[in-house]
Image (cartoon, helix red, strand yellow):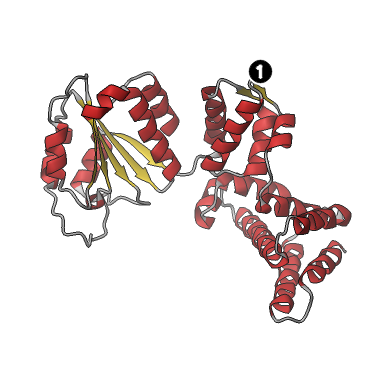
Amino acid sequence: MVLDVWKDLRRKKFAPVYLLYGTETFLINETKQLLMQNALTEEEADFNFSQYDLEETPVETVLEDVETLPFMGERRLVFMQNPFFLTAEKSRQKVEHDVKKLEHYISDPAPYSILVLTAPYEKLDERKKITKELKRKAVTVEAKKLGEHELKIWIRERAAASTVQIDENAIDLLLDLAGTNLMILTNEIDKMALYVDEEKRIDAATVEKLVAKSLEQNVFTLVDKVLQKNVEEAVGIFHELLRQNEEPIKILGVMASQVRLMYQVKEMAKQGYSQQKIAGALRIHPYRVKLALEKTGKFHEAELLRIINELADADYKIKTGQADKALTLELLLLKIER
């Protein structure tokens, strides 16, 4: 688990070889940053840190560097990026790699070096010997979307790194308002940590005051109000979005996407799919599945389908110039409410 690896790095407990793979770039970059901060001092980094792109440099050249004794320091830190030979895809690069030398190295790594392979790929080829050996002998970080439990732990630890505490209900509200993008969450936590510098505590009121709602979150709330038959508040949110210069056609598109998601989640849950499996099939964060399940529990599929059809009809009328954009969407909200 990536959070356990981060704890070891902060304690300056290092492994000789790391494999970082997956498409969650933030987690890969955060792991690399922690290695840089904890494995070397600034002065040591000048002499003992190297970074190579394996689409340009043969792996054996990198290993020569890794096996060189550190200068004016305890260890060397070497990043190897884009090890495409770990995937099933054929590279269009002209660089040839002696992968057997890498296999030999990871079986007996230099005690004074840290070698980090960064593979920003969704899948690795598990049939290849080098992939099997790396997964067996290296410390592996799979950079995938954090589950809800992991995400909440990460938020607490991110706040603690800024020497502040965050309340549990503040975490829930933060996720509701800002979503699950780690970069956005980092920016919001850092901003709130500065704001509560004296109190050293982020509560729900702080989140409500400082965290701006995204268009998606505002529309999610709007859809929720529509489904609750609270048309007055739904129209109020719509007018506020117009004041923020959001395009009605864009609002309509996000609404359609969210109602469609609710319908898909409800159907898959009815068929016995778990929250995690639904998230994997729809390629979304599990927390979004959880929210959708909470919202759709009391609605029939037929009702959600009716709303989807009415949204599609409004979209057609707007795009063919048959109706005013803002007026059409407002009338739609009034119609859906019935």
Q: Is residue 273 left or right of residue 305?
A: left
In depth, the one of 133 and 79 nearer the eye is: 79
Sort mark 1 into few (<14), some (14-19) or many (20+) by Cα contacts within 10 Å.
few
Secondary element under disc 1, as helix, strand or loop, is: loop
Q: Position of residue 98 (x, y in %)?
A: 11, 47
Q: Name the residue rendered at 69%, 36% in the picture.
A: 210
Q: Which three-letter amino acid code belongs to the residue tagged 1?
A: Glu
Where is 311 relative to 317, above or below? above
Q: Name the residue rendered at 14%, 30% in the picture.
A: 108
Tell me where residue 321 sits by quadrant.
bottom right
Q: Is residue 13 left or right of residue 148?
A: left
Q: Is residue 13 left or right of residue 248?
A: left
Q: Is residue 328 visible?
A: yes
Q: Quadrant of the N terminus?
A: top left
In depth, the one of 79 and 123 nearer the eye is: 79
Q: Name the residue rendered at 13%, 54% in the picture.
A: 96
